Amino acid sequence: MTEPQSTAVDEWSVRRIVRTMIPLLAALSVLQLVSGTVLETYEAVLLRYPALLVLVPVQIGTAGNLASITCSRLTTQLYLGTYELSPSNPALRANAGAVFALAATVFGAVGVAAWAIGLALGGSLALGRVLLISLVSGMALAALVVAASVAAVEASYRIGLNPDDTTIPVVTNLCDIAGVLILFAVVSVAL
Amino acid sequence: MPGHDSARDVYRQALPVIAVSLIAGLFAGTILASETMRANIAEVPGLLLLLPAFLATRGGVYGSLGARLSTGLHQGIIEPRFRPDRRLTNAVVASFLNGMTVSVFIAVVTYATLVLFGDGGSLFQLVGVMVVAGFLSAVLMITVLIAVIFVGYRRGLDPDNVIGPVVTTLGDVFGVFFLLVGVAVVGAVS
């Protein structure tokens, strides 16, 4: 195989990957530290309802999973030439449909698991309440995942950065921070 | 052809992996809340503060490595074989450098935050813990990721659907554990 040394920018050079990612990762780390301190302010509520304490990391992790599946798929489609920012694009519709179906399945299961673990840890929230919180915040998070992934791929492509390097860190970090905010917004309405 | 999967295909491929990752996440959360873990965390000021950043960074670094390898495989410019290849080597070296650099950066920012809020803390200890934890996760994540992607790809599994859950699962279960190994190593050295 001939190496594409003639191309102006080699997508697979160490320098290129590191230069793209380090500033991004550094900025996102600082944001994470901020969100860590924000989470600490909700400590009392979380300790009172252990089911919610269980929900926080699992829900954020699941949103991150959905985000990386979406970003990784969109990026591959971009490189294969099947990606197109249009609501009628079948590849885009399939991705979005799968994310919502996965979210409904997983956040339902998460709700039941969080309720059971919360109960075992001495909590008092009813199953219906935990399930409602998990599903509503989870589906809102899924909508955010789809919108943010498409936006990140599109923006990254237009700026000229490789979406493989940029989209997953940006969208998963966004889900970490937004996940906490959405969860507590839903909790404050539902409790 | 990849990229033309229906929503049902994506759902069927991704659900089992997400389910495993979910169970691992619940498992990790339960371990994190255990008595011994909390005692260890209390030993190092700032450890809890840097935990989310550390976990998120590894997700970003190794999730990107996976996405990159997946795109390369789909494009046909890397081969799903375990032998030296310039692109594969570059991607691995770059992700290692990214992981280590950002780990140290997080340690320094966490220390600065602690100093700012007057909570005290040791720069040497935080950097040491992050170097050890960052290195161990790099070795584990890179090895498992390449193995899962290559073997999965050869068996007809689309890597795009499994990278995220694999990274999150390993990150959740081993991330906290490696931090505690880091605490033990730094404690033994100093």
Image: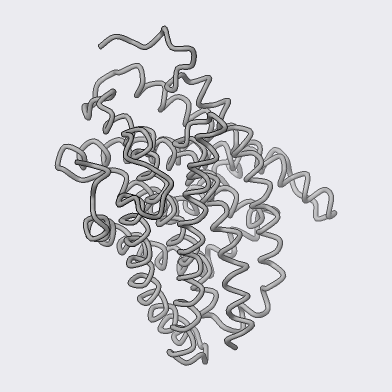
- Image location of residue B148, percent across then percent down: 26, 42
In this rendering, would A57 be left or right of B41? left
- Image location of residue B24, percent across then percent down: 37, 62
Tell which of A9 and B86 is nearer to you. Answer: A9
Image: A163 above or below B177:
above
- Report the label total: 0
Report if residue B190 is visible in the image: no
Tell which of B110 and A103 is nearer to you. Answer: A103
Quadrant placement of the N terminus of chain A: top left
Tell which of A160 and A50 is nearer to you. Answer: A160
- Image location of residue A129, percent across then percent down: 49, 88
Image: A96 above or below B145:
below
- Which residue is located at x 27 percent, y 33 percent? B74
Quadrant placement of the C terminus of chain A: bottom right
In this rendering, would A80 be left or right of A150? left
In this rendering, would B27 be left or right of B84? right
